[in-house]
Image (cartoon, helix red, strand yellow):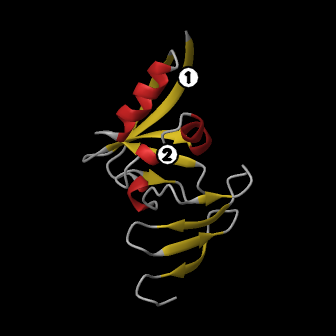
Amino acid sequence: MKKVVKHFYSDGGHGWLRIDRKEAESLNILDKISTYSYQSKNGRFIYLEEDCDAGIYFNAMKAMNVHVDVKYHHSEYSSIRSFPHYSKDSKASDGTGNLKYIKHPNGNEYEYNQHGKLIHAKYSDGFE
């Protein structure tokens, strides 16, 4: 049985399992992940919320006969909460993790450069 190691981050209120977006794509679970999960600013990682989305990942890995070892990290307040919410419509460019834009569920769009720095925001109410 193949094994992989994943990192689980938690704070006093919640927890998230970090996976690579390309892995989620290869497992065909991008459409199953909720907006309760987050993604890194550069779009490379998805932080699956612990209640449902992490279970989708674990089930997909089990079906592939892959065992997931988890390393746990706890903090008082996780910076993951400041990340953009997950969106399957996010476009990572060429596999380098450079993110062109993130479309948030509330309709706002955020564009980041290759360093994960916000360079433009377009809000659903028309302001930029």
Residue 57: % across, % down: 44, 33
In this view, the mark in front (2 or 1): 2
- 14 vs 81: above or below: above
- Residue type highlighted by circle 1: Val
Mark before the other along the chain sequence, 2 or 1: 1
Q: What is the quadrant of residue 3 in the picture?
A: top right
- Between 87 and 117, the one nearer to me in the picture: 87
User: Could you tell me how far apart the alpha carbons at marks 2 and 1 are, in whole angstroms?
Assistant: 19 Å
Q: Position of residue 54 (x, y in %)?
A: 38, 36
Quadrant where the N terminus sits is: top right
Q: Which residue is mark 2?
A: 30
Q: Which mark is residue 38?
A: none
The residue singled out by tag 1 in the image is 4
- Secondary element type, mark 2: helix
Front residue (pair 105, 5): 105
Residue most extreme to the left: 13
